[in-house]
Amino acid sequence: MMTKRNVLFVGITAFAAAALLWVLYAKFGLSCEYVNENGHTTRYCGAIILSLLPLISLIPFSVILYFFRDEVFRAWLHFAYWWVPILVVVTYFSSINFGTRTGGAYGFGGVGQWLLLELLYGVFIFVSFFRIIRAYLKARRI
């Protein structure tokens, strides 16, 4: 069962993993590339770091919800259970380069990539605040 501390721990662990991967890649030259037989280069470090962003976004929500009742936390957690994995997968596949010039999976990238990610993260933030406020008002009536 996920508790408030566990969600905070997952977010902090994802942040630490992203920071460690960035340091290894930027400072020590960790090779995160795969070059296939056609000469196309696929870079994984940036894609992995970006795909950890949805887990890192759990940190502010878990800190905010730490001071609320457990019912409010559970209402938000039911939404986050299915939305965060979607964000992780979409972020990963939109940021990895499969040998395309525009970046992103299957030629999807550039401005469209960032618009899609901004839309999905915006929906996550908006719906999260909506669920938190609705659950808080519902818990206050009881």
Image: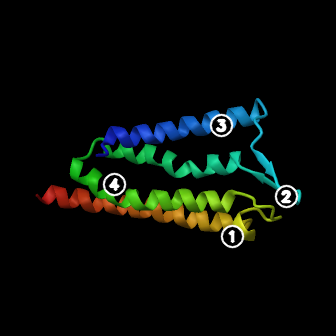
Q: Marks 2/4: CA distance?
A: 40 Å
Query: Of residues 76 and 48, which is closer to you in this image?
Result: 48
Q: Which badge, 3 or 2, is on the more N-terminal residue?
A: 3
In the picture shown, does residue 120 fall above or below 67? below
In the picture shown, does residue 74 fall above or below 5? below
To which quarter of the image does residue 59 belong? top left
Q: Marks 2/1: CA distance?
A: 22 Å
> How far across and down, in percent of the image, does residue 89 sit?
56, 59
Q: Looking at the rendered structure, which numbered label has been put on residue 21? A: 3
Q: Which badge, 2 or 4, is on the more N-terminal residue?
A: 2
Q: Residue furthest front?
A: 37
In which quadrant will I find the C terminus? bottom left
Q: Which badge, 2 or 1, is on the more N-terminal residue?
A: 2
Q: Looking at the rendered structure, which numbered label has been put on residue 40? A: 2
Mark 1 crowd level (few <14, some 14–19, many ≥20, 10 Å Cα)? few
Q: Marks 1/3: CA distance?
A: 26 Å
Q: Amino acid at mark 3?
A: Leu
Q: Secondary structure at mark 1?
A: helix
Query: Can residue 108 be seen in this snapshot?
Result: no
Q: Marks 1/4: CA distance?
A: 29 Å
At x 37% / y 44%, what residue is drawn?
A: 62
Q: Looking at the rendered structure, which numbered label has been put on residue 82? A: none
Q: Marks 4/3: CA distance?
A: 28 Å
Q: Amino acid at mark 4?
A: Leu
Mark 4 crowd level (few <14, some 14–19, many ≥20, 10 Å Cα)? many
At x 32% / y 61%, what residue is drawn?
A: 131
Mark 4 vs mark 3, foreground winner is 3
Q: Which badge, 1 or 3, is on the more N-terminal residue?
A: 3
At x 50% / y 62%, what residue is drawn?
A: 86
Q: Secondary structure at mark 3?
A: helix
Residue hosting label 4? 77
